[in-house]
Amino acid sequence: MRLRIMTYNIHRAIGMDRRFRPERIVRIAEHHAPDILLLQEVDEGAPRSRETDLGRDLAQALGFPHFVVGHNVSLRKGRYGNATLSRYPILRERNIDLTIQSRKRRGCQHTTIEIEKVRGHAHRIDVFNLHLGLGALERVRQIGLLVRSKEFSELEKSQASFVGGDFNDWRSLLHPIFTEILQFGCATQRNYVSDGALRTYPSFSPSGGLDRIYYRGPIRALNARTCRLKLSRVASDHLPVIADFDLH
């Protein structure tokens, strides 16, 4: 079975021209038609985004029947976090707190998604949608929190699972942790050096591979790429990553 996953830090749908234009995010996502869409920096009730419920509005505009939002940061008015949109039913979800001491609040949204039923048996995947911090040591400690969470620690290595989002990992320091220790494959990077990662930031002239997708279990990565639409260079400060997989 083919599955397309897209991860995108949408910067509250405020583009490089400082304009709030969620319709640009919609056009980019429609062009790639993902089955599961992982979004970061999604506002709800914030004046800078016209006090909209951005996760709900994007899900409706794109025709996703299932979506959940995990809020991490509270503003003076409103809040924001990660949103997971799915073509398939979301059976359960929880926002895992990845905040380190007094640093900016961060989180990882876990969802269990039912992909299909065959002869009464449900085929499920576990998806972790995260946005990590800006410090290298902070990010390592955040992965420690994720790995020790109930949602992650109880997963069998044979279970189909994905970890995607904005890793802020400029130097690919987390890459060996995922690939060597946790035994994940990486759809967006072929080797341990940062030059091997798909470059996604800044969108107008990408130099860093901050947005990544890791996978584990009965999954084969087919291809991965960044968006090449001209619109994506202004719609957000990140480029989206699109990856196709074969689930078997």
Image (cartoon, rainbow, N blue to C red):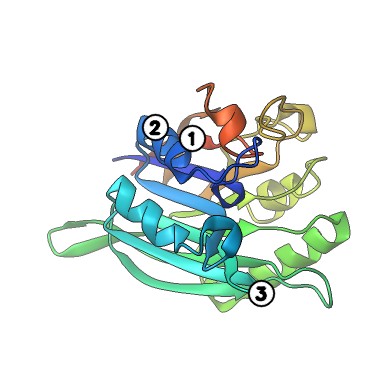
Report if the CB atoms under discs 1 and 2 are less than 8 Å apart. yes
CA distance for labels 2 and 3: 34 Å
CA distance for labels 1 and 3: 28 Å
| Marked residue nearer the N-terminal end (1 or 3) | 3
Reading the image, the residue beneath label 2 is 32
The one nearer the camera, 10 or 158, is 10
Residue depicted at 50% across the width and 42% down the height: 21
Q: Is residue 13 left or right of residue 119?
A: right
In the rendered structure, which amino acid carries the disc numbered 1?
Ile
In the rendered structure, which amino acid carries the disc numbered 3?
Arg
* Placement of 14 over or under 240, stated as above or below: below
Q: Is residue 43 left or right of residue 194?
A: left
Q: Element type at marker 1?
A: strand
Point out the image quarter for the N terminus.
top left
Reading the image, the residue beneath label 3 is 148
In the rendered structure, which amino acid carries the disc numbered 2?
His
Residue 161 in the image, given as x and y percentages of width and height: 47, 55
Residue 7's disc number? none
Q: Is residue 20 left or right of residue 131?
A: left
Residue 82's image quarter? bottom right
Report the mark closest to the observer, 2 or 3: 2
The one nearer the camera, 235 or 133, is 235
Point out the image quarter for the C terminus.
top left
The one nearer the camera, 88 or 104, is 104
Reading the image, the residue beneath label 1 is 242
Residue 6 visible in this rendered orientation of the protein: yes
* Placement of 76 over or under 21, stated as above or below: below
Residue depicted at 77% across the width and 59% down the height: 133
